[in-house]
Image: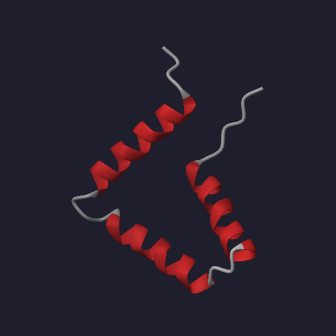
């Protein structure tokens, strides 16, 4: 059985876990999220997207 989750859901789960169990403050999570939105509007966005896609492909394995 294959379960497909958007990356944002997985990252949200880790953020919740960090706040709940590691004692990370909520404002730090908000700040990191806002920084991600800022980066998505810069020239670095294509490189970040490509790196993310490559990382997900490596984790999932090739299905060729």
The image shows residue 39, relative to residue 64, as above or below, that is below
For residue 43, what is the image quadrant?
Answer: bottom left
For the point 64% across and 55% down, the residue is 9
Q: Residue at x 40, y 37 (%)?
A: 54
Instruction: Identify the residue shown where x is 25% and y is 64%.
Output: 42
Residue 60 in percent (x, y) is at: 56, 31
Question: Which residue in the rendered view is the most extreme toward the top?
Answer: 64
Could you tell me residue 1's position as x and y percent?
78, 26
Relative to 49, residue 42 above or below: below
x, y percent for residue 64? 48, 14
What is the residue that sits farthest to the front in this orientation? Answer: 22
Name the residue at the left extreme. Answer: 43
Instruction: Determine the image quadrant of residue 55.
Output: top left
Residue visible at 52% across and 18% down? 63
33 left or right, relative to 17: left
Question: Percent position (x, y) of residue 13?
Answer: 68, 60
């Amino acid at each position: 059985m294959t379960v497909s989750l958007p990356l944002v859901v997985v990252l949200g789960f880790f953020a919740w876990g960090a706040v709940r169990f590691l004692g990370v403050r909520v404002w730090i999570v908000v700040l990191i999220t806002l920084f991600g939105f800022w980066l998505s509007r810069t020239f670095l966005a294509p490189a970040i997207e490509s790196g993310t896609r490559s990382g997900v492909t490596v984790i999932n394995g090739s299905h060729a």
